[in-house]
Image: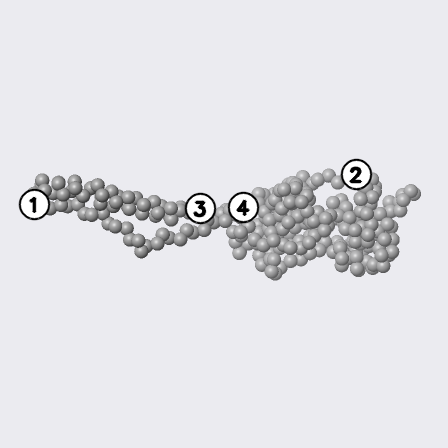
């Protein structure tokens, strides 16, 4: 499994001019001063937040072009602010005022439907059928023994020496035990995930988050907003690349196992899962 940001130039843009406000310091200036006051280096901030060093440096220079988009810029601002002990909300409001207002959700534009895993068809309940057959046989034998004996003797006496061609009903063998019931196949697509593919399920039980998923060829499986209570399942023969806009609101299940990483609210995560995950990858 690999975690990181999108490939970008390792140097802050020299052409970018950070916005200045006479009434308050810039976003980058606030984050840089808070980091210095906390006694933290850029390397330490990068390690604790998983935001690459060139992006941290660019944000402190008010260069948000290295973030890869408005959603990522907001996520990085929130993550860095919390790491240096600053309330991120005023900085996000300032970013919205300086860069075009609140972020609009990206419409979902999947290029093709996600492959669904079909559960096995439910098998007939042979145990119940066998029990019903045994009960019917016992009832027939009991009826024959109690009420059918006299009728049989009278009929044979009237017919004289004509041999009877009817055979007694076979008695059920009590030594045979009913077959053990077989467990029903799981209704969960994740529980039946094939080993020759990678299967990733994303759910948002605690809040909504923008997500993006691609297959090993780079084709988009999903790109949009996952509302609270919704879930998506993706599958590919080799790997699935994910981008989570708010990883703290997401639960991940990879190849039938839940990923236990404790992501923080507002944290932007880039993840890659393969057929061997979560053990390897």
Callout 4: helix, strand or loop? Answer: loop
Name the front one of labels 2 and 1. Answer: 1
Q: CA distance from mark 4 to mark 3?
A: 18 Å
**Could you tell me residue 28's position as x and y percent?**
84, 50
The residue positioned 40% from the left and 46% from the top of the image is 124
Please report whichever mark, 4 or 2, sits nearer to the chain's N-terminal start.
2
Instruction: Check the image and name the residue furthest to the right.
Output: 22
What is the crowding at mark 2: few (fewer than 14 residues within 10 Å), some, or many (at least 20)? few
Helix, strand or loop status at disc 3: loop
- Residue, disc 1: 161
Going from N to C along the chain, the mark reached first, 4 or 3, is 4
Q: Is residue 186 left or right of residue 267?
A: left
User: Residue 271, relative to residue 109: is it above or below?
Assistant: below
Q: Which residue is mark 2?
A: 101
Q: Nearer the viewer, mark 1 or mark 4?
A: 1
In depth, the one of 176 and 27 nearer the eye is 176
Point out the tag, 2 or 1, that comes first from the N-terminus: 2
Q: Which residue is mark 4?
A: 116
Q: Is residue 198 visible?
A: no
Secondary element at image label 2: loop
Query: Residue drawn 56% across and 53% down?
Result: 256
Compute the Cα span from label 2 to label 1: 108 Å
Cα–Cα span, label 4 and label 2: 38 Å
- Write down the residue under mark 3: 122
Query: Mark 1 vs mark 3: which is more N-terminal?
Result: 3
Sequence-wise, which precedes: disc 2 or disc 3?
A: 2
Q: Label 1 vs label 4: CA separation?
A: 72 Å
Quarter of the rendering containing residue 152: top left
- Residue 92: x and y in percent read 80, 44
Q: Which one is in front in this view, the residue at disc 1 or the one at disc 3?
A: 1
């Amino acid at each position: 499994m690999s975690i990181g940001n999108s490939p970008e130039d390792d140097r802050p843009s020299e052409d970018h001019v950070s916005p200045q406000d006479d009434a308050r310091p810039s976003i980058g200036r606030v984050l840089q001063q808070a980091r210095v006051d906390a006694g933290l280096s850029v390397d330490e901030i990068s390690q604790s937040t998983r935001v690459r060093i060139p992006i941290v440096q660019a944000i402190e220079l008010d260069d948000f072009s290295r973030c890869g988009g408005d959603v990522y810029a907001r996520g990085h601002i929130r993550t860095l602010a919390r790491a240096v002990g600053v309330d991120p909300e005023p900085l996000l409001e300032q970013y919205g005022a300086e860069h075009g207002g609140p972020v609009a959700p990206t419409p979902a534009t999947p290029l093709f439907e996600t492959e669904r895993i079909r559960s096995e068809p439910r098998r007939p309940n042979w145990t119940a059928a066998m029990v019903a057959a045994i009960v019917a046989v016992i009832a027939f034998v009991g009826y024959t023994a109690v009420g059918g004996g006299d009728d049989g003797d009278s009929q044979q006496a009237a017919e004289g020496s004509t041999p009877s061609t009817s055979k007694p009903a076979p008695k059920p063998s009590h030594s045979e035990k009913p077959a053990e019931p077989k467990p029903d196949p799981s209704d969960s697509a994740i529980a039946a995930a094939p080993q020759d593919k990678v299967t990733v399920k994303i759910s948002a039980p605690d809040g909504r988050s923008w997500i993006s998923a691609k297959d090993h060829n780079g084709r988009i499986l999903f790109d949009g907003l996952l509302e609270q209570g919704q879930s998506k399942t993706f599958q590919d023969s080799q790997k699935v690349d994910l981008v989570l806009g708010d990883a703290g609101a997401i639960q991940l299940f990879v190849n039938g196992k839940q990923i236990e990483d404790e992501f923080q609210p507002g944290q932007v995560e880039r993840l890659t899962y393969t057929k061997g995950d979560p053990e390897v990858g």
